[in-house]
Image (cartoon, helix red, strand yellow):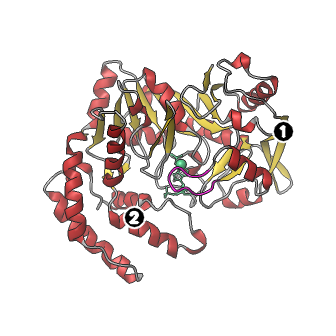
Amino acid sequence: MVDVVLGAFYGDEGKGKVIDYLSKDCKYAVRFSGGNNAGHSIEVDGKKFAFHLIPSGILNKNVKAILGNGVVIDPKVLIEEINNLKENGYPVDNLYISDKAHLILPYHIELDGMLEDIRGERKIGTTKRGIGPAYCDKFQRCGIRMEDFISEKFESYLRTNVENKNTILKAYGYDELSSDDIYNEYKEYAKILKPYICDTTTMLHKALKNNEKILCEGAQATLLDIDFGTYPYVTSSNPTIGGVSIGSGIGSKYIDNVYGVIKAYSSRVGEGPYVTELTDEVGDKIRELGHEYGTTTKRPRRCGWLDLVALNYAIMLNGITGIAMNHLDTIGKLDKIKVCVAYEVDGKREEFFSTNMDFLNKAKPIYEEFDGNFGDISNCKTYDELPDNAKKYIERIEEITNTKIKFLGTGAGREDIIVR
Ligand code: IMO
Ligand code: MG
């Protein structure tokens, strides 16, 4: 009944492409965590769409796209996305926003920048979209939910919060914000978004009763999880499997397939450990070949080889039932490809991942090497058509992870996907 797509590494694995494919057979596409720190790009008929908030499933017009209660929403960004879709021929009459989702407001964005400045050696390299401070307010129970946003309460809730945040900003020498300015601007956004806001949990439960298929779209990724990632170099939500239930209201008993998305190599943006990172010209080459620059922040991504120690951790943690691997075409442009199969830590071989910082800082990758030069695979529509070198690479990964690679991305376009 419910399929889930999750990032298996540090984000930017190409989740949008897999989601776009799977949503063809779905009635609902649901975002359950994160906010506009995400950047999911899909190419349809030569046109590139970059979604930060709206579920990518919306490109299939029969799909109802839901922003679940676990998402934090910057209304300005959301309205821009809605307008962009409308300009491109999508009516956006199939978008539903949870009344329980929390708002990202200008003070969250200010505080995100301020906190990065004062964090010292624990600087994270956040996207500065206000994500962390918005989740902090949610847990501190002073957050403003969508249902408040469109009610009379919005003005007084907002003014109290701005006053409180201003004392913090002032204490650290940052400019204070005007609650008048924010209120006057945001009350207009509330009017625009009001028709989309509803009880999405009940909607999803009605769908489950009617046996309608639901796709849950992960943002961020396993190693960025606030609990199971490389803390403190993580995001402020749970992009792992538990986040699906918390952030949508769908109980775990309904979940069927869990697809973990990876690239045929790896990347990371922001600070934090990364065992298979390549800081040499091979890393630069992967970045150029794979266009590894942020969809959200335009930052060059750190690039490296695929890490099966980390992937096995993601598989265990999320109960991943199938892998989706993107950028097979990109990796196939190299002469030689490496894959990390274990770590060496204090002279010992380790096959289990740990988020312990000491462990990760000491870990050295142990690689297996493969022949690349796959040639042009853009016309391969089935697994059998792939060259032997590609098959050897794929099958060895399946062997070590004991998990089937169900989807293979062979290019940027919507149709560049092999399904097994
Ligand atoms: P998608 O959905 C890659 C990273 C940021 C930073 C850390 C914390 O496109 O895979 P935050 O702004 O969330 O407080 O930043 O998490 N990060 C991502 N990296 N892809 C993402 O999403 C990310 N979302 C957050 O770069 O290191
Ligand atoms: Mg991203």
**Quadrant of the frame with the C terminus:** top right
Q: Position of residue 207 (x, y in %)?
A: 31, 24
Q: Is residue 182 above or below residue 365?
A: below
Q: Quadrant of residue 325?
A: top right
Q: Quadrant of residue 334?
A: top right
> Does the magenta run of residues contain 299?
yes
Q: Residue furthest left?
A: 152
Q: Is residue 136 above or below residue 288?
A: below
The answer to which of marks 1 and 2 sits earlier in the sequence is 2
Specify whether tag 2 is near ligand 1 (CB below 8 Å): no
Q: Which residue is mark 2?
A: 109
Q: Position of residue 339 (x, y in %)?
A: 78, 40
Residue 204 visible, this angle = yes
Mark closer to the observer (1, 2): 1
**Quadrant of the frame with the N terminus:** top left
At 79% from the left and 54% from the top, the residue drawn is 281
Say what amino acid the circle numbered 1 marks. Answer: Asp
> Does the magenta run of residues contain 121?
no
Q: Position of residue 98 (x, y in %)?
A: 29, 42
Q: Which stretch appears magenta?
A: 293-301
At 34% from the left and 36% from the top, the residue drawn is 66
Q: Quadrant of residue 7?
A: top right
Q: Which mark is residue 335?
A: 1
Q: Residues within 10 Å of mark 2 (few under 14, many from 20)?
A: many
329 and 267: which is toward the camera:
329
Q: Is residue 9 above or below residue 207?
A: below
Say what amino acid the circle numbered 2 marks. Answer: Ile
Q: Is residue 390 left or right of residue 174?
A: right
* Helix, strand or loop at mark 2: helix
Residue 2 visible, this angle = no
